[in-house]
């Protein structure tokens, strides 16, 4: 009985912290309509800064708390509100990218400032005082403090929301943001208060939970998964039910720690329990109307067939160039461009075309790597097809429960699936099913050899790089054909309105299963290629957190653009990877760069995508045969000089960067010189017919648009 009471006290104190954190999450979402995935990371940063003040610099505890909670946290909340303001009316994926960028950035910054290899501990509050004894249970002063803080937060939120003008404005903003301004209230001020209050509650929770868990950036940021589950209990709008959910989550974690049987298969289930509970809550509880009726969806461009074929050939040519100019070690590092590109491309049909936000694509990539490694141990060519097929089947299975979810709820559900795999499934020891041995990352790593095609072994970094480039080119062409076909138009109609799509005769289940299966197959294919490129992979390469930068860069590149795959691969495995390789001390800084770009330019980039901006600069190049020929000649000469060992691979890359920068400048100069008589404020549109990548509007486009409208109306 004493043990039962002891675990009950631990569960209640943990539940109190979850209640504080999830309360801030609910207040932020209901007022602003933005679900803050960086909520836990904000608490993590507050805990680290508090440790720096109180332990690192020896400040008094009271002064450290005043500076962290009274000064720095409100200022940080204000900065977050300013950063989030431009994305207020965008779609769910575009709003998520800002908080995902903040999450990735805060983790990278924390790991850069505070070396994760150095152990840090925070003492509990009032640790020098003797514990209390309540009904035979021992309660530490720290545990009592967390419960008191949770009660004060609950009372304070009740008074704020129902007894103050600011609370009235916040509740009115929840009901109708566009109408509240007509009543004399200020929705911007309500948002500002909500963000500052939400970040403040996250910081309080982070400071309270840090003394009882490891002071680690990754684990502290993922504490938010438990708060997610509590918030879903309240359907992201009811604070009392959210607090009840926090009690359920906290007590469940505590009693699983004490009473879960000890064997090789169950330890991970305790770590994954909050994510499992989150997934069950999402599937079982009814959900209210999602915020964002006035959302502005990003455009989904229609790629031309000639342009896509040219782009696919360009990808293959790039693979050939890299395979011939880089050493084996450099190819293992930078040849990941094409494998990561295939993985990133999986987001385009799923989130870009169909509007289904999945945060577990990296998990499906891990499944693909495992399957390819297990079935292709001797270079079987069909192992990579099996990897794509099995990943696709798993993705299609995810689509069945996902039928109940959409928007942020779907993002939360897929995030829960990713965490379940990270903490439990991928850690399971090998077992047999019907005589077939199944293993994950229980041995630490999985070897993934290259296949043998028609007796030709793809077993060197050069061959694997070219093979991955060919696969990415074929996948890009396939996604473009999907966008141009009838199914692509149906998926876009599904993104615009699931209710309207179903009303007009569309089958939600079939459509979602098809797009989830296809995208998951691409993700599994990318994971298999990544394993081949690296030779072996570990579970740490397929965690939920490691997949967020890929999602972030894809959204910044243009979620509905077929070129987002190679753009993301080039960005993550190219210059950002090079920073960490050439200057190891800046590895964490390089990981924060995508997050910083997402925060700084996300509001503008997500509206049209970074690829669209690049296309505008290169339109003149594609239209000018002379300049385009000069650029191809520049590339060919630089390639031949590298093959002749005139310079090394790094100089070749520098020469290519110079060419990429100067070519559009030269094309724009030639264009302006040839149109010097144009005096209008806007430059005339540049026709690009010869390359087929971008061209003026034609009657054929009108016909395509008419067919799309008729299909949607049917």
Image (spheres, rainbow, N blue to C red):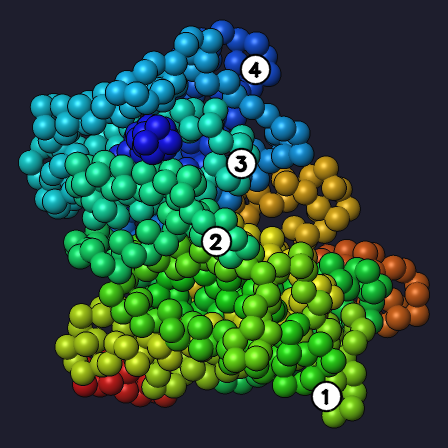
How many numbered callouts?
4
Which percent across, then down, holds residue 502?
19, 76
The CA span between labels 3 and 4 is 17 Å
Q: Which residue is mark 1?
A: 453
State the residue lying farthest toward the left: 183
Neighbor class of circle 3 (other Cα within 10 Å; few <14, some 14-19, many 20+) is many
The CA span between labels 1 and 4 is 60 Å
Tell me the mark number nearer the camera, choosing from 1 and 2: 2
The CA span between labels 1 and 3 is 44 Å
Circles 2 and 3: CB distance less than 8 Å? no
Q: Earlier in the sequence, mark 2 or mark 4?
A: 4
Q: Using the image as rendered, state which of residue 263 and residue 609 is in the foreground.
A: 263
Residue 610 visible, this orientation = no
Q: Earlier in the sequence, mark 1 or mark 4?
A: 4
Say if 65 sits above or below 363 in the image. above
Q: Using the image as rendered, state which of residue 713 and residue 130 is in the foreground.
A: 130
Q: Earlier in the sequence, mark 3 or mark 4?
A: 4
Q: Which residue is mark 4?
A: 55
Residue 63 visible, this orientation = yes
Q: Earlier in the sequence, mark 1 or mark 3?
A: 3
Question: Helix, strand or loop at disc 2?
Answer: loop
Residue plotted at (51% across, 44% down): 104
Which percent across, then down, holds residue 41?
45, 37
Q: Which picture quadrant has residue 402?
A: bottom left
């Amino acid at each position: 009985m004493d043990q039962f009471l002891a675990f009950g006290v631990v569960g209640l104190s943990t539940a109190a912290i979850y209640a504080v954190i999830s309360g801030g999450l609910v207040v932020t979402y209901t007022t602003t309509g933005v679900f803050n995935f960086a909520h836990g990371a904000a608490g993590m940063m507050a805990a680290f800064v508090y440790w720096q003040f109180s332990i690192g610099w020896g400040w008094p505890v009271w002064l450290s708390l005043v500076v962290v909670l009274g000064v720095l946290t409100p200022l940080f909340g204000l900065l977050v509100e300013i950063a989030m303001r431009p994305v207020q009316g965008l779609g769910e994926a575009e709003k998520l990218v800002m908080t995902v960028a903040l999450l990735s950035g805060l983790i990278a910054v924390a790991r850069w400032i505070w070396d994760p290899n150095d152990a840090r501990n925070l003492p509990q509050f009032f640790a020098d005082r003797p514990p209390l004894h309540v009904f035979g249970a021992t309660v530490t002063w720290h545990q009592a403090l967390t419960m008191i803080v949770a009660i004060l937060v609950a009372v304070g939120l009740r008074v704020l929301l129902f007894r103050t003008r600011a609370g009235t404005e916040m509740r009115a903003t929840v009901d109708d943001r566009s109408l509240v301004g007509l009543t004399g209230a200020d929705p911007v001020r309500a948002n500002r208060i909500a963000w500052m209050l939400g970040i403040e509650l996250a910081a309080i929770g982070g400071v309270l939970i840090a003394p009882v868990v490891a002071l680690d950036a990754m684990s502290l940021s993922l504490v938010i998964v438990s708060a997610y589950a509590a918030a879903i209990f309240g359907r992201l709008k009811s604070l009392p039910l959210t607090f009840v959910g926090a009690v359920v989550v906290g007590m469940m974690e505590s009693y699983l720690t004490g009473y879960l049987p000890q064997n090789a298969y169950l330890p991970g289930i305790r770590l994954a329990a909050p994510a499992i509970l989150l997934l069950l809550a999402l599937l079982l509880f009814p959900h209210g109307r999602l915020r964002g009726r006035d959302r502005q969806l990003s455009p989904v461009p229609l790629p031309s067939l000639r342009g896509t074929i040219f782009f696919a050939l360009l990808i293959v040519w790039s693979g050939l160039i890299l395979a011939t100019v880089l050493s084996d070690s450099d190819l293992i590092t930078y040849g990941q461009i094409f494998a990561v590109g295939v993985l990133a491309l999986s987001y385009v049909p799923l989130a870009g075309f169909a509007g289904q936000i999945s945060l577990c694509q990296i998990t499906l990539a891990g499944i693909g790597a495992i399957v390819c490694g297990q079935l292709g141990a001797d270079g079987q060519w069909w192992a990579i097809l099996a990897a794509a097929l099995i990943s696709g089947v798993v993705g299609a299975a995810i689509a069945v429960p996902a039928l109940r979810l959409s928007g942020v709820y779907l993002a939360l559900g897929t995030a829960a699936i990713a965490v379940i795999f990270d903490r439990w499934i991928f850690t399971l020891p090998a077992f047999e099913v019907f005589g077939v041995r199944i293993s994950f990352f229980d041995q630490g790593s999985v070897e993934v050899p290259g296949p043998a095609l028609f007796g030709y072994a793809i077993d060197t970094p050069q061959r694997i790089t070219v093979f991955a480039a060919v696969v990415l080119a074929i996948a890009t062409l396939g996604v473009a054909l999907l966008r141009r076909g009838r199914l692509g138009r149906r998926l876009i109609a599904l993104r615009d309105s699931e209710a309207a799509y179903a009303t007009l005769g569309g089958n939600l289940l079939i459509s979602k299963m098809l797009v989830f299966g296809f995208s998951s197959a691409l993700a599994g294919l990318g994971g298999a290629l990544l394993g081949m490129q690296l030779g072996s992979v570990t579970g740490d390469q397929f965690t939920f957190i490691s997949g967020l930068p890929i999602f972030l860069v894809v959204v910044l590149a243009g979620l509905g653009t077929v070129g987002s795959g190679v753009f993301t691969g080039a960005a993550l495995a190219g210059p950002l990877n090079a920073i960490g390789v050439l200057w190891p001390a800046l590895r964490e800084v390089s990981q924060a760069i995508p997050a910083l770009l997402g925060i700084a330019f996300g509001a503008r980039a997500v509206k049209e995508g970074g690829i669209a901006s690049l296309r505008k600069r290169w339109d003149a190049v594609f239209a000018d045969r002379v300049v385009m020929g000069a650029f191809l000649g520049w590339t060919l000469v630089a390639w031949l000089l590298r093959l002749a060992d005139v310079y090394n691979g790094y100089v070749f890359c520098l020469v290519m960067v110079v060419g990429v920068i100067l070519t559009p400048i030269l094309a724009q100069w030639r264009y302006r010189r040839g149109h010097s008589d144009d005096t209008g404020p806007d430059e005339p549109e540049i026709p690009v017919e010869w390359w087929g990548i971008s061209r003026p509007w034609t009657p054929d486009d009108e016909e395509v648009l008419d067919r799309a409208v008729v299909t949607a109306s049917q």
